[in-house]
Amino acid sequence: KPNDEIGELMKTFMFMAKSLKIQSEYTNSLIYLDSMTGVKNKRAFIDEREKIDAQITSTKIANKDFSFAVVVFDVNNLKYLNDNFGHNAGDEFVAIITGKDFENKIELLTKFRAEMDYLQKNKTDPAEQLSIAAGFAIYNSETDQNFQAVFERADEEMYKAKIAMKGGRDAIR
C-alpha cells in the first residue's frame, strides 16, 4: 500500500528498538568488561556482589536455599611478567560461582588445577609459566551474613595456598 503510514512507523520503531539494544549491549560491554582481556571488571564485581547480598537477604526472609561460592586467585610473580613482557596488570581476580557452575564447582576447580599444572610443567617460555594461588569458600547460610564474609574466607584460603605453594604443595585450598 503506498500510504501505509502505520506500517512504515512500525518498521521505524522496530529499527530504533534494535539499534537501542545494540547500543545498550555495547555500552554495557564498556562498563562491565576489561578492554584488554574481555573479562568482567571491578564494576561488574561490585554489581554482582550487591545482587548476591540482596539475594541472601531475600532468601533468609523467605526461608529458601541459595548457593554460591567465591574463588580468589592471585598470580604469583606478576611484577616479573609485567616488567619483562609488558601489560601493567593487577595480580588478583575473583570468580563468583553460581547456578550450573556452582553445581560443577569441583570439576571446574580440578580442571583449573590441571591447566595450571600443565603450564608449569610444559612451558619453557617465562611469559607462559604462570603460578596462580587460589582460595575457595562456599556460602554458608548459618554463618555468613553477606557476600563479604564469603569473600574474606576465600581470600584467607588464597593466602594459605600461596604460602603452601612456596613449599611445593597444592595451589587451591
Image (tube, rainbow, N blue to C red):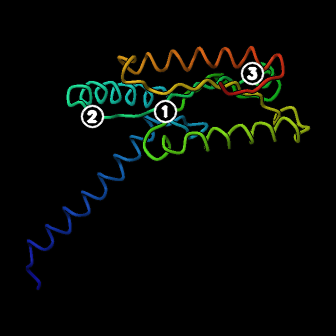
Quadrant of the rendered structure where residue 38 is?
Answer: top right
Q: Nearer the viewer, residue 37 or 2?
A: 37
- Discs 1, 3 touching: Cβ within 8 Å: no
**Mark 3 or 2, nearer chain start:** 2
Question: What numbered label is drawn on residue 76?
Answer: 3
The image quadrant of residue 80 is top right
Q: Which residue is mark 1?
A: 96
Q: Residue furthest bottom?
A: 1
How far is disc 1 from disc 3 in space, using C-alphas?
21 Å
Number of labelled discs? 3
- The amino acid pointed to by label 1 is Ile
What is the three-letter code of the residue carrying label 2?
A: Lys
Q: Residue at x 30, y 30 (%)?
A: 55
Q: Secondary structure at mark 3?
A: loop
Dot 3, how many residues are within 10 Å of its Cα: few (below 14), some (14-19), or many (20+)?
some
Instruction: Give the quarter of the figure containing the N terminus.
Output: bottom left
Amino acid identity at mark 3 = Asn
Which label is found at residue 64? 2
Which part of the image, by quadrant, shows the C terminus? top right
